[in-house]
Image (spheres, rainbow, N blue to C red):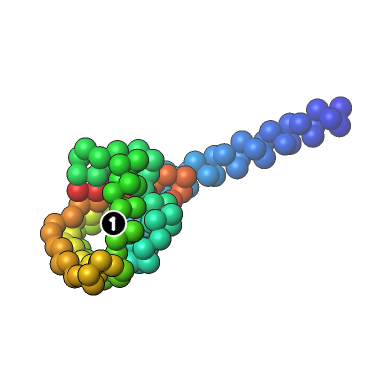
Amino acid sequence: MKKKISIWVFLWILILSLDISSSESRREVTQEEAKQFIEEYIQRFMKLDLGSYMELFSKQAIENRVLPYADIEEAYRRTIQKTQSLLYKMTLYSIEPYTYSAFVRGRYEIVQRLKKKDRVVNLSGEIQFYLIRENSFLKIREIN
């Protein structure tokens, strides 16, 4: 009898913990949360650490509407390997929060100092992020 009660208590605790974690992943993405995510995105990119940077991407991420996760990772690997330092500024135009996601629009400016010949490259343009909540964390699902 004690064994049956213990099993039921264990199952009840397990079900409650699953419900709590799933409700956490269902909570609305706020503008502040999306803004903090973008700030973290910029900081990780400027550190030139591929591993921590790619943690911000969902495994289902797509870049420029065509590149899957593996290609995104390889492209950033090549960029980081040839980069000595990176300055990244972003001006956010809008953050549209939704129940499970957020859509962020802005403009980026990058000053990239290359290792080879100590050359500097300036990049700028419009950028869009589609962020999703995955296991309670925001991740990039699409970036254009």
Q: Residue at x 60, y 42 (%)?
A: 17
Q: Nearer the viewer, residue 83 or 6?
A: 83
* Relative height, residue 10 to residue 97 (above, below): above
**In the shown orientation, is residue 79 left or right of residue 14?**
left
Q: Nearer the viewer, residue 60 or 138?
A: 60
Q: Can residue 46 be seen in this view?
A: yes
Quarter location, residue 64: top left
Q: Residue at x 54, y 39 (%)?
A: 19
Q: Which amino acid does label 1 sit on?
A: Thr
**Label 1 Cα crowd, 10 Å radius (few <14 / some 14-19 / many 20+):** some
**In the shown orientation, is residue 102 left or right of residue 58?**
left
Location of mark 1 (residue): 79
Counting from the top left corner in percent of width and height, residue 23 is at 48, 43
**In the shown orientation, is residue 135 left or right of residue 72?**
right
**In the shown orientation, is residue 124 left or right of residue 27?**
left
Q: Residue at x 53, y 44 (%)?
A: 21
Q: Which residue lies furthest to the right in this view?
A: 1
Q: Is mark 1 on a helix, strand or loop?
A: helix
Counting from the top left corner in percent of width and height, residue 112 is at 23, 67
Q: Residue at x 81, y 28 (%)?
A: 4
Q: Residue furthest front?
A: 117
Counting from the top left corner in percent of width and height, residue 22 is at 49, 41
* Relative height, residue 24 to residue 113 (above, below): above
